[in-house]
Image (tube, grey):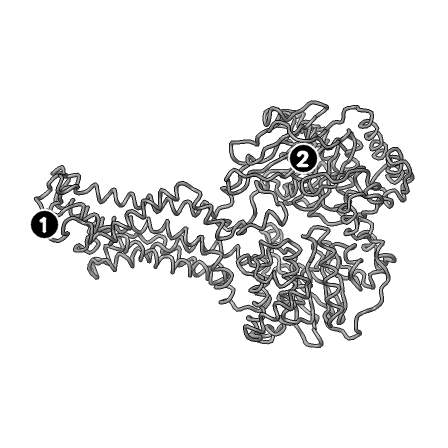
């Protein structure tokens, strides 16, 4: 991970002088990375999945056929023309629930990710940039956070302060930053040793200037890739915590939809339609985010571009053209 | 120096040329070799990297492949080895003993790789497996190619080590226990393990010190004649080629633009690019006594500077010590050196890697703690400054870094890079900073068009000019240049050095250049300070240091510098390559004037 932003050009493109290099963007330039990201099919698939779920969540007040608070059909009614995904144990339309629940799940996931990224990036940058005792201290703290079991902590918090969405966000955010901190730290440690950073430091630039002008922009793409992957973890964690009843029981999220269905014995009633749609929605969202995150990472990782490690070999062409005399 | 190439090599060379002329089969022949690489965006486009390369090498012949970075010289030998990446497509013929080994692709080439054609990869000495002994790694080559195994392989390893000049007892050494020169010898032994007849060497001496370089080149020359080995030497250094090879091919933009004996190329180069290449390679003999342009007042004074670093004690050492003493050992990097740089003076600090020249530079920059001594700029001390004074001092001493590809922030436009030093020191407003940036750019001979460009749109030479401009905006008193041209192509070096030379004339700027390259130093510096093992062994005007060296070390250093002028190679050994080349040229061109 530490060499993700390494600018070593892959051997597949030998330097071709000024003409070859004067494209619209450099080998690690923003446009090049964007191009590499969009070139991959998984990006398109991921973006479509995430986009559809996001759209339906935003538009849920408009497109959901029934209310999510007033019952509109019988208990565990199977899917029908009126209720495409059937009804849950309280006589609520499952399709409406899933559409509504997506919004809350995503907001929780995004805010938890935001917290995790902010803390993780700060710890990573400070630790990697200053090194020494700052590094030792921060990494030791990171180690402690790494081993705190999430669900146990959540149970304790729910028991002490009561279950709420806010607590879920805080707990996920507070425990998820450790991975980001380590990745960013490793990257910053390598950027810090780059000649241009040493040159700017030699000019007398302040730490703040070096960090904000020269180091953060370099780790930015990595942070984005990390964040997109982190969203998947956050959304999954939210679902898991809600399913265990540690989230706000009144909020409609993908997790609570499943929790309620389980509580009302949907499994013994054979009402799979009360559980499966919410579960599938979570799965799709996670896969979508993961696909996008992976393609960003791939685009940033020069090692994946090394083609001589691939199974294919160079090709031979028929002899064409003129024949210059041998020397 | 003349001893580097012996008579046997020269004889083989002329023999090689005769063989080729008479139509007898050369051991390796590239015939109309073209290579295309698929474009990076994978839209199906492609770029032609090699364009009709034809080259023939006779057994025992040494041929140089010369050119600047990106000219396709490495691609040429990779194509001959069949080691191109999958994005490449190839046309042409690679004839080994007259048989084309290319048509079957990987399948037909593989059986010849290493057993017939072996290669010394660029930087291979730094890519040895750190957890295996060199003996094991040499034997591995034989195991992989099923040439020899067991006791036979062991015997062969001893033989090879002896051949490349590594004491046989060292076969159980790990790579980190060997010096750079020894590792390079081990890599050569590996290449020779399966008795190849062709050895392709890609920049085999680039990372080595000049004295070690001379030894390795000597080794390659000797091996070529002893083993009747055809040697292809890929390098950007004309001096290396002139010292080692019989013939050379000059490459530019994927084509061989000119080929011939070294003498022909040097004295009667037809292509303007060939002439430019030779003109850009300074020769030691070009150093002339020069007028003293420096003002007498001292700018930088270093007196009795001593710097040492703590060495982390290894467990072995401390247990052998027995005492468990708390005091760490210290490595003395700079051991009491004194020198000065006057205003408008260009001083070169020359020495091999590890001699303490970089530590000296860091002391002058004020970024290293020193043990004792004094470093003063215009009478004011540089060492031990507090924050504020240090920042002020940073403005007056500026450093040019070795690698222009690393020293600029890729995300900053040239204008931002040039304005940043002013911003850091809070000098001027937006308009005046912009003006200063444009002026600095003008001083390094770049037009204002470059202000809005990004580093990746610039060539290496232009990047180095931009980093020099970034030093100039603060109007420093002293410029420190750490190997300012060693990463640049030879034809660009001249421009950068001329620029530095111009800069110090116009103002009271002093320049301290740190370099391992004596010929560059001799051509541009007013004075040369030679360092070895943390001490100054010799200091004086460039002309007298080069032509009348006093210290034994300087003499060694001078003797090891490869010279592009081929006639010298023959001097000292009667009938050396000078005569050989002369004979070769005579048959070809009629009336030589070597």
Residue A131 pos. (x, y %): 50, 60
Q: Quadrant of residue A39?
A: top left
**What's the residue at 81%, 47% (across, down)?**
B564
Residue A76 pos. (x, y %): 11, 42
The answer to whether residue B166 is seen in the rendering is no
Q: Is residue A282 left or right of residue A87?
A: right
**What's the residue at 50%, 40% (across, down)?**
B43
Q: CA distance from mark 1 to mark 2?
A: 79 Å
- In this figure, which residue is indicated by the disc labeled 2? B119
The answer to whether residue B55 is seen in the rendering is yes
Q: Is residue A156 left or right of residue A82?
A: right
| The C terminus of chain B - image quarter | top right
1 or 2: mark nearer the eye? 1
Q: Quadrant of residue B479?
A: bottom right
The answer to whether residue B341 is above or below residue B132 is below
Q: Are marks 1 and 2 on the same chain?
A: no
**Which of A161/B124 is in front?**
B124
Residue B578 pos. (x, y %): 88, 40
| The N terminus of chain B - image quarter | top right
Q: Mark 1 falls within which chain?
A: A
Secondary structure of the residue carrying numbered label 2: strand
- In this figure, which residue is indicated by the disc labeled 1? A71
Secondary structure of the residue carrying numbered label 1: loop
**Which of B106/A19 is in front?**
A19
Task: Specify the farthest residue to the left.
Answer: A74
The answer to whether residue B443 is above or below residue B54 is below
Task: Specify the farthest residue to the front.
Answer: A322
**Which of A7/B348 is in front?**
A7
The answer to whether residue A63 is above or below residue B336 is above
Q: Mark 2 falls within which chain?
A: B
Q: Residues within 10 Å of mark 1 (few under 14, many from 20)?
A: some
**What's the residue at 25%, 42% (across, down)?**
A280
């Amino acid at each position: 991970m530490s060499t993700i932003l390494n600018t070593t050009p892959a051997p597949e493109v030998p330097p071709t002088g000024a003409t070859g290099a004067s494209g619209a963007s450099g080998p690690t330039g923003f446009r090049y990375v964007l191009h590499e990201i969009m070139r991959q099919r998984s990006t398109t698939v991921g973006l479509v999945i995430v986009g559809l779920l996001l759209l339906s969540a935003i538009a849920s007040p408009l497109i959901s056929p029934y209310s999510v608070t007033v019952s509109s059909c019988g208990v565990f009614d199977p899917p029908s023309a009126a209720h495409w995904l059937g009804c849950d144990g309280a006589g609520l339309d499952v399709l409406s629930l899933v559409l509504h629940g997506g919004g809350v799940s995503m907001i929780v996931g995004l805010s938890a990710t935001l917290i995790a990224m902010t803390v993780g990036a700060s710890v990573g940058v400070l630790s990697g940039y200053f090194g020494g005792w700052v590094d030792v201290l921060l990494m030791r703290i990171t180690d402690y956070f790494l081993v705190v079991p999430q669900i146990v902590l959540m149970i304790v918090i729910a028991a002490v302060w009561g279950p709420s969405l806010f607590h879920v966000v805080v707990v996920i955010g507070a425990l998820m930053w450790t991975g980001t901190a380590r990745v960013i730290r490793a990257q910053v440690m390598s950027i810090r040793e780059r000649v241009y950073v040493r040159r700017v430091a030699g000019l007398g630039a302040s730490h703040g200037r070096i960090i904000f002008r020269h180091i953060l922009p370099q780790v930015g793409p990595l942070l984005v890739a990390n964040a997109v992957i982190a969203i998947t973890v956050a959304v999954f964690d939210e679902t898991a915590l809600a399913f265990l009843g540690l989230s706000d029981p009144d909020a409609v999220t993908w997790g609570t939809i499943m929790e309620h269905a389980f509580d009302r014995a949907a499994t013994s009633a054979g009402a799979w339609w009360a559980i499966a749609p919410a579960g599938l929605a979570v799965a799709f969202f996670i896969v979508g985010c993961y696909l996008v995150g992976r393609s960003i990472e791939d685009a940033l990782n020069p090692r994946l571009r090394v083609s001589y490690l691939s199974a294919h070999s160079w090709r031979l062409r028929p002899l064409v053209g003129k024949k210059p005399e041998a020397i | 120096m003349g001893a580097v190439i012996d008579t046997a090599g020269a004889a083989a060379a002329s023999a090689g040329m005769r063989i080729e002329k008479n139509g007898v089969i050369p051991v390796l022949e590239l015939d109309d070799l073209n290579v295309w690489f698929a474009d990076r965006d994978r839209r199906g486009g492609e770029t032609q990297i090699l364009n009709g390369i034809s080259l023939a090498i006779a057994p025992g012949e040494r041929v140089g492949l010369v050119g600047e970075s990106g000219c396709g010289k490495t691609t040429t030998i990779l194509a001959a080895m069949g080691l191109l990446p999958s994005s490449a497509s190839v046309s042409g013929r690679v004839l080994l003993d007259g048989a084309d080994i290319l048509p079957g692709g990987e399948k037909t080439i593989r059986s010849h790789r290493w057993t017939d054609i072996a290669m010394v990869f660029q930087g291979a000495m730094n890519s040895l497996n750190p957890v295996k002994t060199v003996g094991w790694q040499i034997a591995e080559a034989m195991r992989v190619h099923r040439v020899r195994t067991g006791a036979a392989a062991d015997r062969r390893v001893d033989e090879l080590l002896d051949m490349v000049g590594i004491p046989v007892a060292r076969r159980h050494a790990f790579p980190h226990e060997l010096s750079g020169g020894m590792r390079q010898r081990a890599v050569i032994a590996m290449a020779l393990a399966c008795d190849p007849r062709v050895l392709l060497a890609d920049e085999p001496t680039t990372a080595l010190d000049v004295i070690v370089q001379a030894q390795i080149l000597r080794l390659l020359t000797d091996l070529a004649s002893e083993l009747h080995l055809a040697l292809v030497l890929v390098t950007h250094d004309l001096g290396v080629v002139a010292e080692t090879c019989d013939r050379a091919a000059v490459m530019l933009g994927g084509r061989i633009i000119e080929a011939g004996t070294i003498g022909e190329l040097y004295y009667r180069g037809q292509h303007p690019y060939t002439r430019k290449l030779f003109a850009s390679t300074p020769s030691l003999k070009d150093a002339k006594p020069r007028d003293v342009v420096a003002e007498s007042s001292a700018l930088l004074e270093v007196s009795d500077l001593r710097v040492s670093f703590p060495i982390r004690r290894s467990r072995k050492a401390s247990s052998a010590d027995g005492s468990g003493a708390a005091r760490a050992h210290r490595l003395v990097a700079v051991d009491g050196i004194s020198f000065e740089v006057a205003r408008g003076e260009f001083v070169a600090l020359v020495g091999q890697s590890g001699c303490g020249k970089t530590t000296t530079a860091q002391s002058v920059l004020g970024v290293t703690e020193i043990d004792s001594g004094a470093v003063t700029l215009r009478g004011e001390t540089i060492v031990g400054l507090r924050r504020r004074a240090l920042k002020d001092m940073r403005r007056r001493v500026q450093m040019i870094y070795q690698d222009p590809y690393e020293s600029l922030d890729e995300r900053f436009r040239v204008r931002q890079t040039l304005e940043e030093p002013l911003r850091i020191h809070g000098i001027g407003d937006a308009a005046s900073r912009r003006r200063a940036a444009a002026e600095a750019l003008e001083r390094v001979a770049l037009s204002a068009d470059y202000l809005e460009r990004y580093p990746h749109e610039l060539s290496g030479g232009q990047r180095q000019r931009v980093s020099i401009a970034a030093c100039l905006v603060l109007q420093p008193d002293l410029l420190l240049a750490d190997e300012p041209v060693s990463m640049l192509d030879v034809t660009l070096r001249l421009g950068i050095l001329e620029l530095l030379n111009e800069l110090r004339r116009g103002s009271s700027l002093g320049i301290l250049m740190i370099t391992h390259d004596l010929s560059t130093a001799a051509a541009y510096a007013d004075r040369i300070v030679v360092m070895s093992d943390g001490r100054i062994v010799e200091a004086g005007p460039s002309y007298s240091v080069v032509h009348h060296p006093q210290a034994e070390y300087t003499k060694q250093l001078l003797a090891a510098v490869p010279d592009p002028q081929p006639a010298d190679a023959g001097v000292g050994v009667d009938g050396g390559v000078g005569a050989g080349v002369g004979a070769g040229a005579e048959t070809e061109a009629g009336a030589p004037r070597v």
